[in-house]
Amino acid sequence: MKYLKTYKLFESVNDTLKLESENDFEYLNDNIKYLSIEYDIKNWPKLPKHLIELNCYVQNIDVLPKLPNSLETLNCSKNNLKELPILPKKLTHLNCTNNQLKELPKLPNTLELLYCYNNKLTELPTLPESIIQLNFYNNPLEKLPNGITKKLLNNQDVRYIKENVLKWLVNKIEDYDLLKDYLTESQRKSYEENGPEVFTEMNQFGFFGLKNNKMK
């Protein structure tokens, strides 16, 4: 039997399991709370109904199974996922970085950590108030998500923000107060003198490097 002890403090070693092949499925049971996938799984078994944590990163996985309602932590980073299943209502930590995701499902109101950088996301779902840590770097986002705050925005790479700030303002001008610190002095002056429409004009004429960005 192949049990794995991770950074978690477990009630007992018997609630933790790693799967290295389908031959290990026989050890799955509803007492398993912490599960690690250690191979390129194609045929998922039914997950334990009391599962709390699922780690399946760096395995070239292209699909995830239905997730149990008890799940609190999901790390599926560095795979080949194009979509995620419905997220459990108790989920607090989601790391889905370095995949091929074009959209995310609705985020549960319990979510505290969301890492989704290095994907193909053009927008994010509304962020719940519970979010404490967020990183969406290196996605072709066309606007900032609803629920974003300056504190969360500051977690992103500053160069990435500066490269995209005008694109986001064209699509969602009400984010000006959040993004104005990333504008140049001339850009802020143009806004103050001409109002929100100045960024639409900048978009049309390719000012400030906008011509290489995706715009609606």
Image (spheres, rainbow, N blue to C red):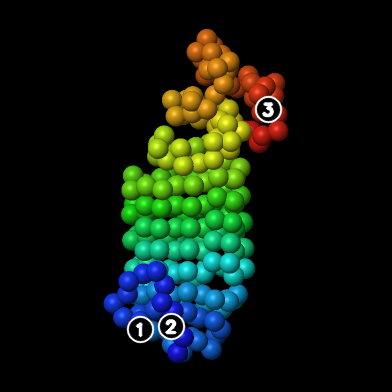
**Residue marked by disc 1:** 14
Image location (x, y in percent) of residue 176: 47, 25
**Residue marked by disc 2:** 3
For marks 1 and 2 on the same chain, the one whose residue lies earlier in the sequence: 2
Q: Are marks 1 and 2 in contact (CB under 8 Å)?
A: yes
Residue at image location 33% in from the left, 44% down from the top = 129
Q: Is residue 44 left or right of residue 113?
A: right
Q: Is residue 139 above or below residue 174?
A: below
Q: Secondary structure at mark 2?
A: loop
Type of amino acid under label 1? Asn
Crowd class of label 2 (few under 14; some 14 to 19; many from 20; radius 10 Å): some
Image location (x, y in percent) of residue 109: 34, 52
Q: Secondary structure at mark 1?
A: helix
Q: CA distance from mark 3 to mark 1?
A: 56 Å
Type of amino acid under label 3? Gly
Residue at image location 41% in from the left, 34% down from the top = 150
Type of amino acid under label 2? Tyr
Q: CA distance from mark 2 to mark 3?
A: 53 Å
Image location (x, y in percent) of residue 196: 52, 19
Question: Toward the viewer: 123 or 176?
Answer: 176
Q: Which disc, if any, is residue 161?
A: none
> Can residue 65 be seen?
yes
Image location (x, y in percent) of residue 137: 55, 45
For marks 2 and 3 on the same chain, the one whose residue lies earlier in the sequence: 2
Q: Are marks 3 and 1 in contact (CB under 8 Å)?
A: no
Q: Nearer the viewer, mark 3 or mark 1?
A: 1
**Residue marked by disc 3:** 209
Question: Toward the viewer: 106 or 76?
Answer: 76
